[in-house]
Amino acid sequence: MKVHIPGALRSYTERSETEAGGTTLGALLADLERQYPGIRFRMVDEQDRIRRHIRIFVNGDQVFALAHALDANDEVVIVQALSGG
Amino acid sequence: MARVGTVSATKLKKTATRKMLLLVATRKGAWIYHGDAARKTWQADGPHFLGHIINHIVLDPRDGRTLLAAAKTGHLGPTVFRSTDLGRTWKEAAQPPAFKKTPDGKGRAVDHTFWLTPGHATEPGVWYAGTSPQGLFRSADGGVTWTPFSHINDDPRYIEWMGTVQDGTPDGPKLHSIIVDPRNPAHLYFGMSGGGVHESVDGGATFRPLIDGMEVVGGFDRTTVAFHDPHCVRICPSHPDRLYQQNHCGIYRIDRPSNHWVRIGVTMPHEVGDIGFTMTVHPHDADTVWVFPMDGQTVWPRTSPEGRPAVYVTRDAGQSWRRLDAGLPASQAWWTVKRQAMTADTFDPLGLYFGTTSGELWASRDEGGKWACIAQHLPEIYAVEAALVA
């Protein structure tokens, strides 16, 4: 499925949009990690919590759980939230 | 008092043929300053990682070419970058410092790696890292992969002594001042703000507090480890039985095997006090250290006292202190120096360097006798390390 990458993470992907697969958000992030080593830990901490200033939207709705189910036609947008100066 | 740990000037001058670098970590990236042989002119290389919060950048003294940088950004999680060509190229650690995952997912998460220490000379590739919230980590492969180290990250006593995020410094409690005894790789120290100074004599299998003699904020119990706030601890390379400490509550010295810290800051001028963050030891003279006092009165302004910045030096292990402010602003300078932001080289005469919260880099080529500003308009400086490369 299509995944939009925020500017802060494009040093990994070198593009604003990429393709990744998975039946859950967790599996999708694992696939991104396989393609772009190091990218997952910048978004998700060691307790599997999405980091404070990262937001992930699926088809326009914000999701919070790595167990969130995904469909092959979903569109995933990763956003860097405001984080101060 | 007898002077200890003094090395001849002839030996010191051998270092003068090597190239000098200043590694500057800031709130918005890292810079590497390349000095000429006389340390008079400096060429800026940077920014590296523009926009990243760089808490520490350190050269591996064992190979003279590997750099590690502790990084994060406002949005992204923490990581460590590694360069084996003095910063021309960087590669991210495959496994940055991270706590163990707990079954309930409520465990601690590293916010940022704060401190990096190369391992013992006999252990190439070994590095230690201290984090916020407080955690101790080790790498055995030159910083590529990191694992939790020792018992302290999960020890209930240590968790209690570390306190909560509210008990720490404004941007999070730190594990810092990781020290490897140059005589023995199994002899380790570290400090926690807050949480005291700790020592291991068995390679990290066990640690124990080393807080006797250290004071705490008035009204609190000094036997409670959690109340202790060492800001920076340094071992004397020329006499490793001696350590110095800049603490939230004063300046201290300890001479092992004694377990008692002596508050040597009581001999500082009363109007300046002995509060600060940095502690810089002379690499060849264990009686000489430099500190950078700050205003720790009332609401803790964390500025130079009265807006008049100065370094203070003792050359007799703390019996007396001398103000070193030639070349520094005489008034209306309200910056200070953070705990990792002052360092020394190993030349003769020795050079001193510090970076300020206002983004200025200052240097002295005569052990603090006269100061010159060698860079300005940088972001807030978090750390400065002097490094010699072949």
Image (cartoon, grey):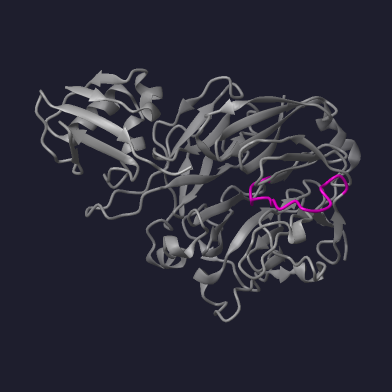
Q: Residue at x 27, y 46 (%)?
A: A49
Looking at this view, is B83 or B125 the one in front? B83
- Quick check: is B329 in the magenta stretch? yes
Which part of the image, by quadrant, shows the N terminus of chain B?
bottom right
Which span is picked out in magenta? Answer: B326-341
Q: Position of residue A11 (x, y in %)?
A: 41, 23
Dividing the picture into quadrants, the one containing residue A81 is top left
Q: Position of residue B57 (x, y in %)?
A: 59, 36
Which part of the image, by quadrant, shows the C terminus of chain B?
top right
Question: Relative to B240, is A30 on the left or the right?
Answer: left
Q: Position of residue B125 (x, y in %)?
A: 53, 34
Question: Relative to B174, is B378 on the left or the right?
Answer: right
Going by the picture, which residue comes out furthest to the front? B332
Q: Residue at x 18, y 43 (%)?
A: A65
Q: Residue at x 13, y 27 (%)?
A: A74
Looking at this view, is B185 or B373 the one in front? B373
Is residue B4 visible to the viewer in this orientation of the structure? yes
- Quick check: is A79 in the magenta stretch? no
Looking at this view, is B255 or A20 the one in front? A20
Dividing the picture into quadrants, the one containing residue B30 is top right
Question: Relative to B50, is A37 on the left or the right?
Answer: left
Q: Which SS does the magenta portion mostly show? A: loop
Question: Relative to B224, is B180 on the left or the right?
Answer: right
Dividing the picture into quadrants, the one containing residue B11 is top right
Count of marks, rendered view = 0
Q: Position of residue B172 (x, y in %)?
A: 48, 55
